[in-house]
Amino acid sequence: MKKGVTWSDSQASHLLNNRVLQPNKQLLRAAAYAFALVPADSGARQLRAWEDEGGATALAAESVRVLIVDNDMSSADSLELMLHAAGHSNTRVAYSGHAALAIAAEFLPSVVLLELNLLDMNGYALAKLLREHAQSRGLRLIALTSSREHAGREQARRAGCERYLLKPVVALDLIELLKMSR
């Protein structure tokens, strides 16, 4: 597991015993993002059989390169875990704006999930810098925030963000946005 994400022994054994991640309503009350382990259904076995016979699946498709930028480590790590559970394993996490710039230069993400309220730099300024460094690449910036201010949405749009998602992020909404990036 990645640093910053801790699992109890029972959770780790569930993960190793071919389990998948699903939202847990009780845990969602305690944190912005939380996912608990539950058994995989027979559909997963059918999917593996289909893949073994040469069939293509959404999970087998080339994953979108996603950079998650959030100074809240638990939120960022949980969001990354959610993406991995949905088949998007090509991810990186930056816990500051300066780290995001360094990681983006090497990783070359196609999508950046950007918390606008960063501690070390203005999230809107970071969005502009990421957009400038991407030049002709089709970089998609998606703003993440808990602020419901209308002015923030407009400012995010001017900074180059094409979407503005409120936390906690609805997993299905995010997955749909990432499908559009393939």
Image: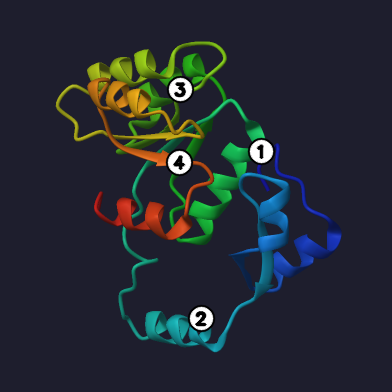
Q: Circle 4: is it few (<14), some (14-19), or many (20+) Cα within 10 Å?
A: some
In the figure, residue 21 lies in which quadrant? bottom right
Give the mark nearest the N terminus, 1 or 2. 2
Label placed on residue 44 = 2
The local secondary structure at tag 4 comes to: strand
Label 1 belongs to which residue? 74
User: Looking at the picture, how far across and down is residue 41, in whole percent?
Assistant: 57, 84
Label 4 belongs to which residue? 166
User: Looking at the picture, how far across and down is residue 74, in whole percent?
Assistant: 66, 38
User: What colouring style does the render use?
Assistant: rainbow
Q: Are marks 1 and 2 in contact (CB under 8 Å)?
A: no
Q: Are marks 4 and 2 in contact (CB under 8 Å)?
A: no
Give the mark nearest the N terminus, 4 or 1. 1
Residue type at tag 3: Ala
Residue type at tag 4: Leu
Give the mark nearest the N terminus, 1 or 3. 1
Q: Nearer the viewer, residue 98 or 17?
A: 98
Give the mark nearest the N terminus, 3 or 2. 2
Q: Is residue 7 left or right of residue 83?
A: right
Q: Are marks 3 and 2 in contact (CB under 8 Å)?
A: no
